[in-house]
Amino acid sequence: MPSIRPFKAIIYNKKKVKDFTKVVAPPYDVIPPAMQSALYKKHENNIVRLILGKIKKSDDVSSNRYTRAKEFFDAWLNKDILIEDDGEAIYIYSQKYKYDGKIIERIGFISALKLELSDKKAVLPHENTLQAPKADRLNLMRSVSANLSPVFMLYQDDKDEVGAILKKVMKATKPFIDISIDGIRNRAWKISRSDAIEKIERFMTDKNVFIADGHHRYETAINYANETGSENSKYTLAYFCKLDDDSLTILPTHRLIKDIGKLTKNDILEKLNRYFIVEEYPSAKKCISRPKELRDYHAFGMYMGGKKFYCLKLNKENAARTFMGEGSQDWKSLDVAILHKFIIQNVLDIRDEDDNIEFVKDADEALTLAGKGKFKIAFLLNPTKVSQMKKVAEHGEKMPRKATYFYPKPLSGLVIRKI
């Protein structure tokens, strides 16, 4: 079962850094090159220099993004840009934002989490990982010997027992961080009282936790712990949130297809009509909104360029499940699984590989790119539900890539755990 504990965080020094908005950043894996450059310019001590340093043409074994991250980290510590907190603590982290017309506050806590080095049943993933990102993160960990960003975890708390502890501290004390970025208010508090920490520790000891985001970081932490064998390396930095549909927002990730072989638009419609109710619309607006109206069914928006837009509603679910082969009924009920395993691979027989598929968060952008002819088909999806993710993870199954995009992303740079 998962074991958590407080830790002595490395934090930015308020005496040296007056505006924390200039030094924090999103997780490394959602920072494109343009954002990376912007974060570099934002502040000379922005955390991006540690979590996603720039690559230079002159890089070699002795001088590269990883060695530079260590140089920055050590220098910032020596200059008191980064300082060690005055005692061990668990840190409350709240993100308040507006989505779909509602104000939502996601409240969680950051602590050290003991890694599951042998029996992984207590920490349940839902995504497959790739070797290249894990090698990249491992090189960084070897260099800086620190957890620079937390793994995002979810836990079941039906009676809100931990939430009550967190909210009590939030009400009684002022946050030591209170910043707003892109319309999201980020606040952090410190829990240093031993009785409150012990209550949280006891609650978490018999709970399974689910990895929401940071699969590569979690597996990298395990690889690092196995490599070093040190006691401190057997823990990683984790951000825990209650598994709750009301306070957790998952955004959809839409798909763009580059190569469809010899298929024509008529071929595609003919094949899809066998299994779907295909609705045609003259504007993009309905292509985006109609699947949302049918979110209790398996519905997708589709655009192939030109003036016609479509909504696909699955009409023959049993046939789809037969084509999808092995897997639990929960896995076969995922829209993203139906799209990849049934529509793309079976009905249309399109190559389902990363070099043929682009993943886009914004529906308008997906339709625009397809309209320009850069891509042959745009598929719009509804987001995966939190409850679906939980069921699939409990089965020990993995979702298709880019199945979940939890919003908002926890910021990097609020607290760092030195190993």
Image (cartoon, grey):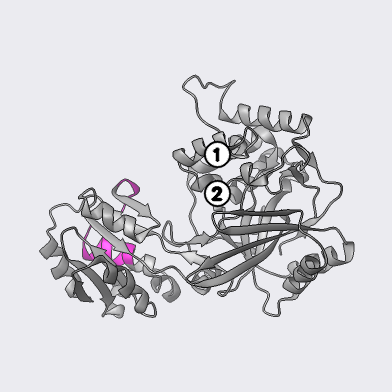
* Disc number for residue 235: none
Residue lying at the far right of the rendered structure: 194
Tag 1 residue: 39
Q: Residue at x 42, y 76 (%)?
A: 329
Asked which secondary structure carries label 1, the reply is helix
Instruction: Count residues near mark 2 (Cα–Cα under 10 Å), then give few for <14, some for 14-19, many for 20+.
Output: many
Residue 334 position within the rendered picture, expressed as x and y whole percent measured from the top left: 40, 70
Q: Residue at x 85, y 58 (%)?
A: 192
Q: Is residue 263 above or below residue 283?
A: above
Asked which secondary structure carries label 2, the reply is helix
Residue bounds of the magenta highlight: 339-355
* Amino acid beneath label 2: His
Residue 227: say if magenta: no
Residue 37 position within the rendered picture, expressed as x and y whole percent measured from the top left: 50, 35
Along the viewing direction, whichever of 4 and 131 lies nearer the viewer: 4
Q: Is residue 179 above or below residue 132?
A: below
Query: Which quadrant of the rendered structure holds the N terminus?
Result: bottom right
Q: Residue at x 56, y 25 (%)?
A: 64
**Residue 375 as seen in the image, left or right of residue 413:** left
Tag 2 residue: 216
Residue 344: say if magenta: yes
Along the viewing direction, whichever of 368 and 391 lies nearer the viewer: 368
**Residue 2 as seen in the image, left or right of residue 219:** right
Distance between the Cα atoms at labels 2 and 1? 23 Å
